[in-house]
């Protein structure tokens, strides 16, 4: 058995962390069979009654926010040299007000878009802000998103009293988000984003997908129950596709494309058995990337410095979430049907290696979407990490100020066990041979559409740093 935690308890541990992160009634948003986003939602019927599409009510007002004081930064985690500022992106904050479920709301919307209108692609990645205060869907795909010129829209659907208002009461004291209204707020704000008179400043939104990561994937799944009902004022889809990540729920069948990205944490505990589909009403792909963890532990500022007992995984989560998002964007925008992929193999036997996954001779998952990190390995990648005991003297502000912060982040992150130099010499002979094999693997995967050219040099730089 490998790793700092007993792998047989991973489902309980991940579930406990989810309880902390989701908080309150949002737990129901994880959906699945029988839940609010369960099978049958999105098929045009609810409880046997046909659903008639209707134009959603637009918010009554929106306004730009520039002060007072600092803006809450919900997307601080990026690869070095690849921040929104480096790409000339604007980060614009708005308050949007309306009525949902008979209750007034004023929510926060953040738009990240190219500073130069000519660089804008016409495509938008929207997401509900994670209750931990993060725009993870943007963070985990930002290099690709900005290279492509896509805009990113973040919508607050949980109580601002958890994080936003306490951060700057003078700036955010007006925010009010009624409990249980996340789906209607997502519909109204999404329709506003697509309108000619919304905060996109007249830029046409050709297509928009709704993404999510972990808890915010639960919010997405909950929204699917109203997807058949709500439309824009001209009766078009509000969201043209869906991108749930770090989530293993059973996604209901709907009439737009879905690309679903479970991670090793979900494969170990509770992963969907739904098969890919191409038929109308069943346009679905599930992409399981071998070696990927529930949260990014490479560039996540919450995990820097490392508060965990084992070395953080430096697997580039962003590079592979971005592969999935790029396939979804082409599917909804150009009708390019994405490739199907193998799933990670499961033997459901924790007695042989401490995991329900099938592992290769190097301790990495067999099957799934391949990458050079597991095909030409210098380490094994494992869920889940655990908090260091005793805790380090220096940790991130998020870990320091969040009750149980180290435990939460470490349980949801992967760790890596680097191979000793003797094993690397046995496998590859020399660093030069290793780098050649690694680059050949990368080139082959790029040609097959399983790695993006935008990440080519970053991935190769990881190989260049290996010495033995």
Image: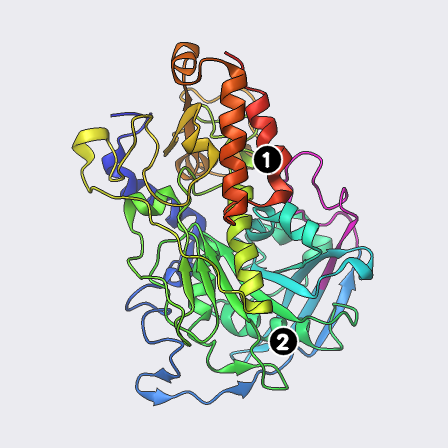
Q: Residue at x 41, y 64 (%)?
A: 284
Asked whether 435 falls inside the magenta stretch, the response is: no
Instruction: Choose between 208 and 377: the one closer to the eye.
Output: 377
Residue 169 seen: yes
Q: Residue at x 71, y 35 (%)?
A: 81
**Where residue 213 sits in the image (x, y, percent)?**
48, 52
The earlier-in-sequence mark between 1 and 2 is 2
- Left/right placement of residue 147 relative to residue 229 reads right
- Do callouts 1 and 2 mark residues in contact (Cβ within 8 Å)? no
The residue tagged 1 is 301
Mark 2: secondary structure = helix
Image quarter of the N terminus: top left
Q: Residue at x 45, y 13 (%)?
A: 429
Instruction: Choose between 172 and 141: the one closer to the eye.
Output: 141
Colouring? rainbow
Which range is magenta? 67-94
Instruction: Choose between 410 and 105: the one closer to the eye.
Output: 410
Mark 1: secondary structure = helix
The residue tagged 2 is 191
Q: Is residue 81 above or below residue 127?
A: above
Q: How crowded is the residue under tag 1: few (<14 C-alpha within 10 Å), some, or many (20+)? A: some
Instruction: Choose between 352 and 370: the one closer to the eye.
Output: 370
The chief SS type of the magenta part is loop
Q: How crowded is the residue under tag 2: few (<14 C-alpha within 10 Å), some, or many (20+)? A: many
- Left/right placement of residue 173 relative to residue 437 reads right
Disc 1 and disc 2: Cα gap in Å? 33 Å
Q: Is residue 405 above or below residue 217?
A: above
- Left/right placement of residue 434 relative to residue 78 reads left
Q: Residue 94, which numbered label?
A: none
Q: In which quadrant of the rendered view does residue 30 lie?
A: bottom left
């Amino acid at each position: 058995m490998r790793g700092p935690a007993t792998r047989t308890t991973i489902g309980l541990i991940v579930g406990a962390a989810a309880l902390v992160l989701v908080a309150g009634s949002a737990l129901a948003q994880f959906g699945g069979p029988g839940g609010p986003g369960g099978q049958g939602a999105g098929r045009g019927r609810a409880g046997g009654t046909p659903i008639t599409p209707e134009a959603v009510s637009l918010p009554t007002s929106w306004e730009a926010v520039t002060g007072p004081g600092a803006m809450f930064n919900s997307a601080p985690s990026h690869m070095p040299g690849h921040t929104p500022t480096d790409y000339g992106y604007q980060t614009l904050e708005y308050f949007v007000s309306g009525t949902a479920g008979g209750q007034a709301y004023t929510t926060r919307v953040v738009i990240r878009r190219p500073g130069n209108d000519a660089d804008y692609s016409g495509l938008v990645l929207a997401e509900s802000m994670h209750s931990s205060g993060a725009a993870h869907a943007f963070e985990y795909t930002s290099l690709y998103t900005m290279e492509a010129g896509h805009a990113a829209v973040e919508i607050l659907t949980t109580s601002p009293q958890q994080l936003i208002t306490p951060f700057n009461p003078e700036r955010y004291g007006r925010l009010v988000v009624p409990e249980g209204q996340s789906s209607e707020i997502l519909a109204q704000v999404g329709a506003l984003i697509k309108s000619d008179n919304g905060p996109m400043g007249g830029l046409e939104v050709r297509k928009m997908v709704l993404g999510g990561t972990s808890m915010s994937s639960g919010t997405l799944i909950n929204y699917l129950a109203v997807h058949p009902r709500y439309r824009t004022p001209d009766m078009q889809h509000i969201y043209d596709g869906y991108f749930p990540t770090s989530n293993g729920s059973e996604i209901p069948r709907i009439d737009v494309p879905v690309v679903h990205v479970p991670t090793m944490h979900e494969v170990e505990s509770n992963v969907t058995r739904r098969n890919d589909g191409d038929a109308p009403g069943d346009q679905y792909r599930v992409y399981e990337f071998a070696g990927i963890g529930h949260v990014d532990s490479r560039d996540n500022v919450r995990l820097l410095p490392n508060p965990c007992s084992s070395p953080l995984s430096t697997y580039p989560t962003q590079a592979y979430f971005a592969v999935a998002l790029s396939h979804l964007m082409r599917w909804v925008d150009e009708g390019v049907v994405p490739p199907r992929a193998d799933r990670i193999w499961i033997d459901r036997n924790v007695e042989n290696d401490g995991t329900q996954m099938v592992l290769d001779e190097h301790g990495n998952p067999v099957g799934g979407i391949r990458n050079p990190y597991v095909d030409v390995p210098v380490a094994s990648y494992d869920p889940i990490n655990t908090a260091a005991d005793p805790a380090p003297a220096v940790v991130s502000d998020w870990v320091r100020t969040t009750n149980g912060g180290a435990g939460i982040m470490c349980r949801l992150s992967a760790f890596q066990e680097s191979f000793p130099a003797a094993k690397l010499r046995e496998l590859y002979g020399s660093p030069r041979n290793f780098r050649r094999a690694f680059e050949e693997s990368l080139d082959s995967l790029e040609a097959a559409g399983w790695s993006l050219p935008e990440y080519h040099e970053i991935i190769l730089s990881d190989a260049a740093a290996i010495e033995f």
